DNA sequence: CAAGATACGTCAACATGACTGACGTATCTC
DNA sequence: GAGATACGTCAGTCATGTTGACGTATCTTG
């Protein structure tokens, strides 16, 4: 009962992995882990009267300033009508601003306002706390494993898009 | 382009982890990994005219036969009204059946019918394929790391509930 | 340069799955 | 017997997704 460091579970993958129970274990941890992480910002979002959808847009715009609407649509994998509503609200409430593309003027480039950046930073602070603490309690070797398994879940066709979020385009 | 084994990303967590970029990396992989895994059963669910909510209920009932409504409510963390609709549909369409609790007759015990078990197995097959292949491509050491990080995301107060899914109660 | 493709926006109707609030019944516990 | 508990249900609302149809500005190409 005093073993706070790590609960007595998941002692390690057995040599014969792919066993049903290990797959179910992964499904459950992914489900609970993901929902609990997102829960970390629910309160903050509610304060602002925003939802998850707003956060996702905010997040990717923060991650990749001057993202185009089309790129954001691909990342979120929703319809332009759904995204339209979200962007309109974010713009009306001055969390984001847009500018026409310089190379292609049909494009609309998305960027956070100062107000938007402050909000995103505050939301990120909560996510970072949660995830950092999970990283620390699991240990560094675990973190790379965590990444590799998740990468394996992303279809080949989507990987470039995801990996390109990592500091390119600037 | 022929490097199918693992895309040139996430070469390993740096010694100074907790850096912003590594946290963002985790957030993104978790988001894309989770959504892509759940996408794996969308088609199958659509065939049956069922939604994600139905699957989650089906999954946990499969995982823990004779689960009570109250326990399922805690796992799903939704309101009884929401769950009520889902369970009613599953029962009407004979995917699940219920029986009064033997020790406490106020309780309703949930169990899959044969038809329900077949459906759950089919859905699980798709999830297993996806997740197994991610496990294999990441390697066994990665799988335990994957688990440990996710466990760290689950609040202490919820862990018992999650770990108890692992083959107890039978 | 005209024709067509592309990037984006928008109107309208609808589905899903959550929520709150209120109330009812059977059963258990003290 | 009184109150708590497990479950059900009616009614209304909200957030977020969907399809389908059109409109406009701009880029690309034969």
Image: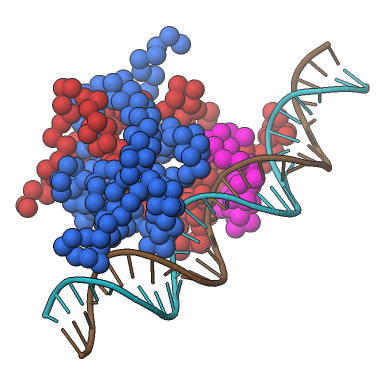
Chain colours: A red, B blue, C cyan, D brown
The vertical placement of B82 against B117, above or below, is below
Count all numbered tags in the image, as a single digit: 0
Name the residue rendered at 18%, 51% in the picture. Answer: B160
Picture coordinates of residue B127, whole percent (x, y)? 36, 32
Residue A43 sits inside the magenta stretch: no
- In the image, B110 versus B12, the foreground residue is B110
Residue A80 sits inside the magenta stretch: yes
Picture coordinates of residue B168, whole percent (x, y)? 15, 46
Query: Residue A110: in sight, yes or no?
Result: no
- In the image, A17 versus A32, the foreground residue is A17
Q: Would residue A139 be found to the left or right of residue B19 on screen? A: left
Direction top: furthest residue: B2
- In the image, A33 versus B65, the foreground residue is B65
Name the residue rendered at 31%, 45% in the picture. Answer: B112
Q: Would residue A134 be found to the left or right of residue B133 on screen? A: left
Quadrant of the rendered structure where residue B133 is?
top left
Region in magenta: A70-98
Name the residue rendered at 31%, 20% in the picture. Answer: B137
What secondary structure prevails in the magenta region? helix
Picture coordinates of residue D14, whole percent (x, y)? 54, 63
Q: Would residue A140 be found to the left or right of residue A69 on screen? A: left
Name the residue rendered at 16%, 22% in the picture. Answer: A15
Quadrant of the rendered structure where residue A30 is?
top left
The vertical placement of B70 against B127, above or below, is below
Picture coordinates of residue A19, whole percent (x, y)? 22, 27
Query: Residue A158: in sight, yes or no?
Result: yes
């Amino acid at each position: 009962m005093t073993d706070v460091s790590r609960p007595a579970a998941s002692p390690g993958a057995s040599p014969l992995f792919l066993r049903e129970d290990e797959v179910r274990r992964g499904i459950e941890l992914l489900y609970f882990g993901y929902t609990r992480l997102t829960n970390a910002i629910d309160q903050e979002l509610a304060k602002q009267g925003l939802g998850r959808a707003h956060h996702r847009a905010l997040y990717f715009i923060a991650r990749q300033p001057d993202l185009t609407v089309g790129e954001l649509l691909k990342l979120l994998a929703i319809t332009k009508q759904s995204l339209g509503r979200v962007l309109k609200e974010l713009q009306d409430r001055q969390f984001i601003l847009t500018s026409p593309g310089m190379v292609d003027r049909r494009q609309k480039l998305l960027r956070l306002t100062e107000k938007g950046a402050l909000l995103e930073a505050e939301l990120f602070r909560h996510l970072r706390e949660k995830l950092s603490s999970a990283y620390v309690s699991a240990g560094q070797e675990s973190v790379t494993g965590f990444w590799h398994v998740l990468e394996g879940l992303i279809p080949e066709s989507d990987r470039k898009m995801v990996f390109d979020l990592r500091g390119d385009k600037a």
